[in-house]
Structure formats: structure tokens, C-alpha cells
Image (cartoon, rainbow, N blue to C red):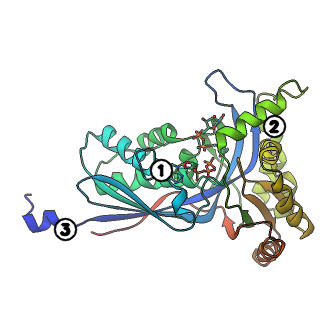
Amino acid sequence: MTLSPVEVAITREVRVRAPGKVNLSLHVGPVSPDGYHPLTTVFQAVSVFEEVVARTCDERVVTVSGPQAELVPTDASNLALRAAELVAQAAGIDEGVHLHIDKGVPVAGGMAGGSADAAAALLACDALWGAGLSRAQLLELAAQLGSDVPFVLQGHTAVGQGRGDLLTPVLGRGEFHWAFAVQGRGLSAGAVYRELDALRDGAADLGLPPDLDDDVPLLQALRAGDPRALGAALHNDLQDAALSLDPRLAEPLGVARDAGALGVVVSGSGPTVAALGRSRQHALVLAAAFTASGAADRVLTATGPVAGARVVSTSD
Ligand SMILES: C[C@](O)(CO)[C@H](O)COP(=O)(O)OP(=O)(O)OC[C@H]1O[C@@H](n2ccc(N)nc2=O)[C@H](O)[C@@H]1O
Ligand SMILES: Nc1ncnc2c1ncn2[C@@H]1O[C@H](COP(=O)(O)OP(=O)(O)OP(=O)(O)O)[C@@H](O)[C@H]1O
């Protein structure tokens, strides 16, 4: 079919939503020669979302709106633009795209905001350009963009091994209710891993190869849908390193404990602190405690698990 000039000029758009994540557990092994650390982590996708809209355009450009938008690069280092580049290469396509990111996930907060943009852009460009990449191809491109990108593409709850990109879905029941204390200042994941290495250097604990056996109580809590048991099993090997780089994180951790959180943990590489509530109502109480204490620059509440990156609408 040949399109008329009018049809060619019509702007098409694809809208995709992708969630942030919290690491329910994160066990970090000793650093490998490639600079990465072997992990065993249990991810949960939570209802804090990035929205990426892809529109037809002559060039490849990105714009950003929402909280902390000014902290997100709009040059070729932007993870959504890099995702577009990978889709174009994989499908042999030479098309432009305007990607607009509306941020809901904190920037450099340990909740995989940039990774969610990358996952959303993979799906959006694939659909906009009719690239027809398979799920396996998209997951392979996701792993090239960052260790958390495959998980935010998949969503729900999953064990991540290797760099965090080798995923096994976790069966569970129920819905968990979270409050997040977000900081205006970010932490770089690479810097937090390096701080962990520095803290371990010379200490008795050099870090063992991570072992899924450590997570048996956590996986049982998820299977039973038991928030109390889940709260007791939350664990993050990066927490002390994040606290060492940003000692003020002790405040939101203490506030959540005092407010009766079932469990409280630094999310991923931080600095966001995640507190687990007994119910939706209790998560709101925890959020109010964060706000009242002044220990957070922004407070979010969310439920998990939720689905991974999804096309929400297309213009045709
Ligand atoms: C902290 C977590 O969010 C937990 O899920 C992730 O491990 C970090 O995921 P990410 O931000 O997608 O990380 P990447 O962009 O892949 O890597 C950023 C930097 O973190 C360090 N890194 C990351 C993953 C890993 N398994 N070991 C590492 O040492 C490396 O120095 C790397 O250069
Ligand atoms: N689309 C993007 N959105 C946010 N940050 C981006 C993006 N593209 C590149 N970056 C860069 O990546 C850095 C990390 O941002 P991101 O929000 O992904 O951190 P994070 O949530 O801590 O990630 P993770 O939990 O995966 O470690 C930012 O400081 C920013 O410079």
C-alpha cells in the first residue's frame, strides 16, 4: 500500500508506562574482574511509574518533565535515546523519534527510574517503527542498557542473578503497601558498589558468592502473602555503603521504625528508603511520619507487585 503525502505527515504516537522497583533483598558477592558484582536479589515492581511517549519525528530527540526533570541528561547518554538506538540497529531501521519522558520515579534514587525509561523506550520504539522484535530480543537489548532494565521490562516479583539481569519469576500472593522517603540528592549505583568494596577491604567479611538459600524466609513470606514475615526478611548488602556515603539516611530509617513499619530498607543503591506498612492505611501513616520529620524531600506511597513495561495506547 502506498501512503498519500497527507497520511505520511500524520504524527503517530505510542504511550508506554514502566514501573520503578524496590529490592526486597540484595546480596552482593565479591567484585569480578569486569568491575561488576555477582548478585542474588529479589525485585518487586511497585506502582510508581515513568511514562514515555514516542512520536514520529525526523530526528532522535528526548524531552523530560516531572519532578527532578532537570537532573536527567537529554544528550546521547539518555537511556531512552540509547534504547531507541539499539532498537533501530537490531531491526535495521533508520527512523527518527521524539521520546517524551514524564518522570514519576525518583532520579538516581535506587528505584530504577532511568532503567524504566529505557525499558519503556524499547517497547515504544519497537511499536512505533513496527520493528517486530521478539520478547527475547527485547530482553537482550535491555541487559545491554543496564542491570535493572530486564526486570522493569518484566515486572511483578522476580529473583535476579548474575548482574541482576538473569531473571526467574517468583510466585506470590497478595499486595504489599509501601511508603518511600525520597531525597533531592541522588547516589550513583557505581559509587555505592565501590564504597561497599572499600568497607569490605581488609575486613573479615569480603563478601561471599551470593546464595539464594539466604532468601528462603523471604520467598516463603511472598508465597504466603504475609507482610509481617516479609518485613522481617527485608535485607540490603548495599545499605551500609549507602549510609557511609550519605549518613543522613539514618533519619528516615529511624522514623519508619518508630512509626511501626513492618520492615525498612534502603532501596537498591539508595538514597530512597522503603518502609513496608501493615495496610494501605498504615503506609499512609508511614508517609505522614516521613513528611512530619523533615527526613525526606518528597514522599511516595505505592503498592507492589505490579506489571512491567506496557503499551498503554497507540494513535492508531
Ligand atoms: C543497585 C541496583 O539497582 C540493584 O538492583 C543495581 O545493581 C544497579 O543497576 P543499574 O543502575 O541498572 O546499574 P548499571 O547501569 O548496570 O551499572 C552501574 C554501575 O553499578 C555497578 N554494578 C552494577 C550492577 C552489578 N551487579 N554490579 C556492579 O558493580 C558497576 O560499577 C556499574 O558500572
Ligand atoms: N532517562 C533517564 N532518566 C534518569 N536518569 C538517566 C536517564 N538517562 C540517563 N540517566 C542518568 O542515570 C543516572 C541514574 O539515574 P536512575 O534514575 O536510573 O538511578 P537509579 O534509580 O538509582 O537507578 P538504579 O536503581 O537502576 O541503580 C542519573 O544520574 C542520570 O545521570
Q: Position of residue 230 (x, y in %)?
A: 82, 57
| Residue under the image location 42 percent in, 46 percent down | 83
Label 2, label 1: how far apart the Cα atoms are: 31 Å
Is 255 displayed left or right of 14 in the figure? Answer: right
Which circle's residue, 2 or 1, is located before the other in the chain?
1
Name the residue tied to disc 3: 10
Query: To which residue does mark 2 refer?
Result: 213
Q: Residue at x 64, y 20 (%)?
A: 33
Q: Which residue is mark 1?
A: 118
Residue 211 visible in the snapshot: no
Q: Nearer the viewer, mark 2 or mark 1?
A: 1
**Pointer 1 residue Cβ closer than 8 Å to ligand 2:** yes
> In terms of depth relative to the viewer, which is nearer, 306 or 240?
240
Question: Which of the two labelled residues, at mark 3 and mark 1, occupies the earlier sequence position?
Answer: 3
Q: Amino acid at mark 2?
A: Asp
Gap between marks 3 and 1, in whole Å? 26 Å
Say if mark 3 contacts mark 1, CB within 8 Å: no
